[in-house]
Image: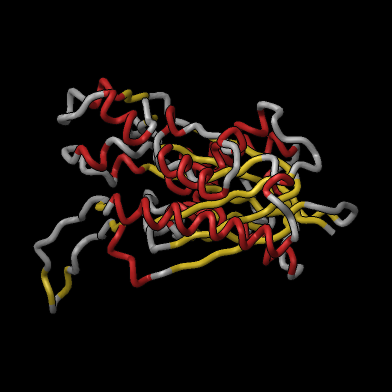
Amino acid sequence: MAVRIIGTGSYLPDKIADNNFLSTIVDTDDEWIRQRTGIKERHLSDGNEGTTYMATHAAEAALENAGIPAEDLDMIIVATVSADTYVPSTSCSVQGTIGAIRATCFDINAACSGFLFALNTAYAYIEMGMARTVLIAGSETLSREVDWSDRSSCILFGDGAGAAVVQRDDGAEGGFLASITGSDGTQGDVLTCKGRGIQNPFHTSRRKKDYIRMDGQAVFRFAVSTVPRCIRQILKKTELETEDIKYFVLHQANYRIIEAIARRLKVDLEKFPTNLDHYGNTSSASIPILLDELNRNGLLERGDKIIMSGFGGGLTWGAVLLEW
């Protein structure tokens, strides 16, 4: 029995803000941004393309790619830190739009590791016999969470969504092979985005909703130490070598981080596909968007082994080994 991804999809807003455009908003320039991050442009919502809208379109694309109707879904899991509403959940809203009438739905928040946590959750439900076909998605409208007067953070983030259909295949081998996940709440202050203050008869907060705040150097150190360790643990667990892996599909946060991880693993940078130059950091959506591009461009073939690894606020991290 194998649990494998049978379809992928993604959605990016039409509006594009390149680095030159951002230089008209904050004190920055194209060269400064590209040298520090590798980002050239990012897609931003026009106000009509919220988290639910993008997740829905990515889900529909994934279902079409998988060749199955929405009615076949047993479950929908959406990873997001930027939901349009607290209630209903993004996953329930997606369900209502696509007509997945049998699906159990819930959202998860593991920041930029969210898609991998959703994939692990889907696998667990399928392995326990509680579901057969699950849609997982990462969808973010980070432009609503960014302080557009802060040049250190507003240059990093973009909006978008990615999705995948995960299904049990009783007559196949491969698929989901191994995973590693972890969290460290003691370092939660490294990357935060606070909610609204408390307003009730016993307390009135004057604090309004906050924006994304990040200690960039701390995140860099965390990522370049944690991701290689995760990947080595996965390889040891499965008795594989880096040479056995076709691609390392990492969270797209910063090109310098990806370069440093490749060096630490002593793996050719060509095995680390990237698209952050066009999309920036889309948090939970970054890995499934990149996975969808690889899939649709014919770069993944049956039997290929890939490792996906994410890291983000919480702090959270994880890695998943798949045989395509």
How far from the left and from the top, in percent, is residue 113? 49, 55
Quarter of the picture holding the C terminus: top right
Give the answer, above or below, for where 88 lies relative to 150: below
Q: Residue at x 12, y 75 (%)?
A: 203
Image coords of residue 46 (percent x, y): 33, 30
- Vertical arrangement, residue 29 with respect to residue 152, above or below: above
Q: Residue at x 37, y 36 (%)?
A: 158
Q: Is residue 182 left or right of residue 142?
A: right
**Identity of the residue drawn at 67% across and 56% down:** 102
Q: Which is nearer the eye, 33 or 268? A: 268
- Observer able to see residue 51: no
Side of 59 relative to 55 (left or right): right
**Colouring chosen for the image of the structure:** secondary structure
User: Which residue, as the protein is rendered here, is positioned at the far right?
Assistant: 171
Q: Residue at x 51, y 49 (%)?
A: 264
Percent x, y for residue 204? 11, 70
Left or right: 169 in relation to 244? right
Q: Quadrant of the N terminus?
A: bottom right
Q: Can residue 147 be spotted in the picture?
A: yes
Q: Answer above or below: position of 317 versus 138.
A: below
Residue 139, horizontal then vertical, whole percent:
47, 45
- Total numbered labels: 0
Given the current orientation, which residue lies at the most extreme top position? 20
Q: Quadrant of residue 199?
A: bottom left
- Pick the residue in front: 85 or 24: 24
Q: Is residue 309 above or below residue 280?
A: below
